[in-house]
Image: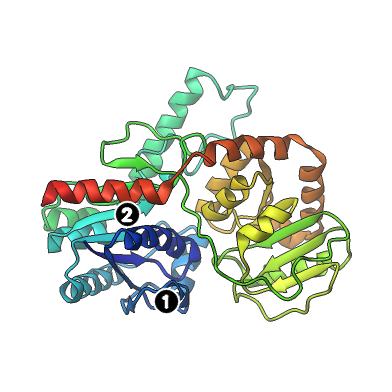
Amino acid sequence: MIILCIPYTHTLSHLSRPLVLAKELKSRGHEVIFAGESSNTAFIRQEGFSVLPVYEPDPEILFGNIRKGKLRFISNAEIEHMIEADLALYSVVKPDIVLTDGRFTAPISTHMAKIVHAAIVNASSTEYRALPYIPFFDWLHERLIKRDTRLWKILDQLNLRLEMLVFDNIMNIFKRLSKKHGLKKTITSTNCLTGKDITFLADIPEYFPTKNLPKDYYHIGPITWQSNLSPPAWWPPNARNQLIYITMGTTGLGDFFQLAYNLFQEGQYTCVMTTGRQSERMPTIPGHIYIEEYIDGDMVVKACDAVVCHGGNGTIYQALLHGKPIIGISTIPDQAYNMRRVESLRVGMSLSWKEFYTNPKMLLDTIHAVLANTYFAKNARQMQKILKTCRPAKTAADIMERYMKTKS
């Protein structure tokens, strides 16, 4: 097969998942070509894949809109521009199948080009999620309505329908384009990240439950990238105290790093912090705080006692794969949704960006609370046992090959 991968390369979470699957597909003899335009495409080239240019939305605008709570997260003109870029790319590559992660125009453009489309997505970004994305009724105290009652489940279902109705009608360009181009499956802002033909849910149902999944949706488990970065010269750290790993992905806020840096100079914990090039270089203080732009995350998570992150899906699963508890400081709704699950499963605690920014010391207090209560780590190890049974890249590659055989 000729497989064209189009991740949203500005964020490593959307880039790394198809990259892992691409390595599995390449090992089976398939040709895999990537497309993207950010500086992060260097990671793709390091793995031996070619990368063609393709237009991608500006992350400052996209994530800026999302952080501001704008349901119209991207303009109609941008969507039209992306579809044109998709179609131009398809005409050059002529792929048998397009694999995407974060490319919300692909379900429409692949229909227009009559190409098979598979997508990697989180269960939270589908209409089959079992839990509300924005909990409208959480203000109701549990003394009024217990969370395990039938009434609460009815409210959850009402919540889901309302949030999808509002979101899909505000961003109704997806519906209009679906009708214009005669799509069998109507694309909406709720399902625009899913696949036209195959959807891989990079989740386990124990973490993100779903309901009424169609037969072309598959739980494959989290796809985590095994970095080939060499350890820094200072590794392993001289950890005088418990070791904390801090990573804010590539959608974090630059202000965070200096505030966190100031906290960990005090020496209550030893810290390894990665900035993802989102902050000015800060000096390492041996024994207290170690700073890198990027690092082998698995190496650090395995050695640390807890992970502080932005609540990104990939980082949460990386922590749980090693049985480590999580402290999350979310900056966008997706991350807040993830952290509600972390708290519900009692594998970590959440801190809002406003709480941290107003009083950074709250981060140290939260870390202390998580490390002092052993049930967080115990529950994380239970999740680790489930995650160890997943073979996401192999499962996804098998499904793609079987599907394409039915088309030949």
Count of all numbered marks drawn on residues in the image: 2
As drawn, the label of residue 387 is none
Is label 1 or label 2 in front? 1
Q: Residue 400 placed where, x, y %?
A: 26, 50
Identify whether 259 is placed above or below 69.
below
Task: Give the residue number, with chain letter if any, for mark 1.
Answer: 45
The residue closer to the viewer here, 13 or 58, is 13
Which amino acid, mark 2? Answer: Ala
Q: From the viewer's perspective, is 165 left or right of 94?
A: right
The residue closer to the viewer here, 398 or 12, is 398
Q: Residue 32 placed where, x, y %?
A: 30, 67
Residue at x-position 41% and y-position 38%: 129
Which amino acid, mark 1? Answer: Arg
Residue 309's image quarter?
bottom right
Task: Give the residue number, with chain letter if any, for mark 2.
Answer: 119
Task: Please rate how many residues cluster around mark 2, counting C-alpha atoms within 10 Å: few if below 14, some from 14 to 19, many from 20.
Answer: many
Q: CA distance from mark 1 to mark 2?
A: 21 Å
Q: From the viewer's perspective, is 341 left or right of 218?
A: right
Residue at x-position 12% and y-position 58%: 181
Secondary structure under the numbered disc 2 in the rendered image? strand
Q: Residue 395 placed where, x, y %?
A: 36, 45
Secondary structure under the numbered disc 1 in the rendered image? helix
The color scheme shown is: rainbow
Residue 235's image quarter?
bottom right
